[in-house]
Image (cartoon, rainbow, N blue to C red):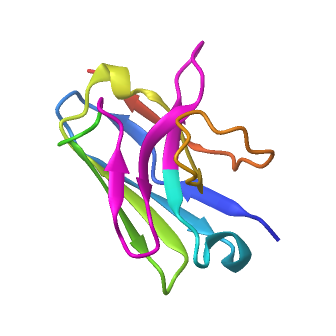
Amino acid sequence: QVQVAESGGGLVQPGGTLRISCIASESMFSGRSMAWYRQAPGKERGLVAGITPAGLANYADAVKGRFTITRDNANNAVYLQMSSLKPEDTAVYYCNWYSGSFYPKYDYWGQGTQVTVSS
């Protein structure tokens, strides 16, 4: 069964840090590249960062140098450490497979976790 649960979002001040987590089902996670995506109001859901099973990471230009994606293969988990947060990082963050597409059209998405950057 394909299933994912995102957590850890919240309200943070500009310049602050936040770590969000994703726990996926075994069938969804095992041997697959995973990614974080985000969707701001009125905008399309797009790639933030992706990571291969071996740990190779790729980042959107907007977050390079500020965000770090990691994974724990033993626990089917993917994490996104966010630092130097900006108001434009405000969005709902989702976890899903990573295919290399910036705007993937998957049928399944979790509920996401809201990240709000505001003073």
Image position, residue 4 (x, y; %)? 67, 61
Residue that extends furthest to the bottom in the rendered view of this protein: 74
Please tell me which residue is depicted at 53% across the width and 32% down the height of the picture. Answer: 46
Q: Is residue 67 visible?
A: yes
Q: In x, y percent, where is residue 88?
A: 35, 20
The residue at 69%/73% (across/down) is: 25
Where residue 71 sits, quadrant-wise, is bottom left
Give, as a single range, the part of the protein colored magenta.
36-62
* 16 left or right, relative to 35: left
Q: Is residue 31 above or below residue 44?
A: below
Above or below: residue 101 compared with residue 90: below
| Residue 80 higher or lower than 73, as above or below | above
Q: Position of residue 50 (x, y in %)?
A: 44, 53
Nearest the camera: 95 or 92?
A: 95
The answer to which of 70 and 14 lies nearer the viewer is 70
Is 111 in front, or is 59?
A: 59
| Res 68 quadrant in image | bottom left
**How far from the left and from the top, in percent, is residue 77?**
50, 71
Q: Is residue 108 highlighted in magenta?
A: no
Side of 110 where 119 appears, left or right = left
Would residue 114 be visible to someone looking at this image?
Answer: no
* Quadrant holding the C terminus: top left
Give the quadrant of residue 69.
Answer: bottom left
Q: Residue at x 69, y 50 (%)?
A: 110
- Quadrant housing the N terminus: bottom right
